[in-house]
Image (cartoon, rainbow, N blue to C red):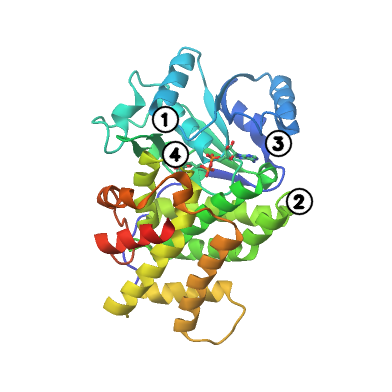
Amino acid sequence: MIAPFVFARNPAIQFGSGKISVLPKAVKAYGKHVLIITGAASFINSKTWAKLQDDFSNNGITWDHFTIDKEPSPSLVDECVKNFQEKNIEVVVAIGGGSVLDAGKAISAMLREKASVQLFLEGVGTRTHSGNKVPFIAVPTTSGTGSEATKNAVLSEVGEQGFKKSLRHDNFVPDLAIVDPDLTLSCPKHITAYTGMDAFTQLLESFLSTNANPMTDSLALEGLKRISASLVNCYENGKTDIGARTDMAYASLISGITLANAGLGTVHGFASTIGGYFDIPHGVICSALMGPVNNITVKSLQQKDPDNIALQKYAEVGKLFSKDKNKSDAYYIEFILTQIDELTKRLEIPKLSAFNLTGKDIDRIVTGSDNKNNPVKLSPEQMAKALEMAL
Ligand code: NAD
């Protein structure tokens, strides 16, 4: 019997190669003056941006422009809001990686508030957001975070007292996601690797989540199928292989939908804590921890809870990645664990020690992290072991 579940709202979605062309018309549905948020370099130096500006002008659209050059902080969001609050912004459009999308999501949420975004951050502030926002269109240029489909924006203040926390409200799901894989062709190999592994982790963790439901399961499996078909091709031939880029753009979008509805596991339980203390790209943290956390999770389930459905799910994922037919569940479980380790090496994912994280940091990271919806709760000792393996 299907257990009761909730499936939250999604953005309207325009998906496919060339879809960026619908943006001017989509903006006009909301008004004539738009705030565009982009990264600092790749997109604004592209022919697509030059054409988009012509198309905006031809459609009578005027715009302000703000750039984001790192994972966003509350002060950066406040600065942008201060600059543009009085400018009658009718719609916010973010075109970029997860950092730009999250910045845009937070800015659209704060343009109608007269207070710092920090006051509304989960676990940091004390105020509850009303959900009143300026309409928001998300246009991802990486295939990784799925932020174009989620209701949260992740903001961080990195340092000894640092934090990485979400601004969250059902209304913050973007009104429209334009997912055009052409925009990801310019991603360099290392960013393709980190972000692709982030999407893989999000799909796997939401599939295994204790809060998964039949809708998230079928979506996550489809996303994982695309990862198995195309992550390596994207890494090897990402400048030209639009088929592989399209698969990864789809996998990433789906990962946002599944994570928003099923939740995530221990890898992401670590990611926000580590991301508050260290300036390490989110995708690297997730990729480096994926192998260790899944290895320890499987061993723990096999010892303590061998009938747990999560083990069958690991086998199902192993089948998607393996060419071998008619093997046992144990074979496919081992296969997917080995596959994750091999992908981590093939995609040249750095160890966390490359970013000055050392054994001395393990205790405080474990103390600040949690298992989220991991299929088994790892003990502090097991979490410490996973971290040590990722160093
Ligand atoms: P990113 O946005 O930080 O981008 C990484 C780098 O890639 C940047 O230097 C950027 O300029 C560059 N880049 C982006 N697109 C490019 C392109 N097409 N060509 C060339 N260079 C390009 O990285 P990300 O992994 O996409 O996003 C990470 C952020 O997303 C983190 O802050 C993380 O916490 C957040 N996140 C949010 C959610 C959510 O649901 N809101 C989910 C997961 C992660």
Could you give the CA–CA distance between mark 4 and mark 3, rounded to whole angstroms?
35 Å
Disc 3 residue type (three-letter): Ser
**Residue 43 on image: x %, y %:** 66, 33
Report helix, strand or loop for mark 2: loop
Circle 2/circle 1 CB separation < 8 Å: no
**Looking at the image, residue 367 lies above or below residue 64:** below
Q: Circle 1 is placed at which residue position?
A: 73
Looking at marks 3 and 2 on the same chain, the residue that comes earlier in the sequence is marked by 3
Tally the numbered discs: 4
Beta carbon of the mark 4 residue lies under 8 A of ligand 1 = no
- The image's mark for residue 240 is 2
Could you give the CA–CA distance between mark 4 and mark 2, rounded to whole angstroms?
31 Å
Report helix, strand or loop for mark 4: loop
At label 4, counting other C-alpha atoms closer than 10 Å, the crowd grade (few under 14, some 14-19, many 20 or more) is some
At label 1, counting other C-alpha atoms closer than 10 Å, the crowd grade (few under 14, some 14-19, many 20 or more) is many
Q: Circle 3 is placed at which residue position?
A: 21
Looking at marks 4 and 3 on the same chain, the residue that comes earlier in the sequence is marked by 3
Report helix, strand or loop for mark 3: helix
Disc 1 residue type (three-letter): Ser
Quarter of the image where the N terminus is located: bottom left
Q: Circle 4 is placed at which residue position?
A: 279
At label 2, counting other C-alpha atoms closer than 10 Å, the crowd grade (few under 14, some 14-19, many 20 or more) is few
Looking at marks 4 and 2 on the same chain, the residue that comes earlier in the sequence is marked by 2
**Looking at the image, residue 144 lies above or below residue 37:** below
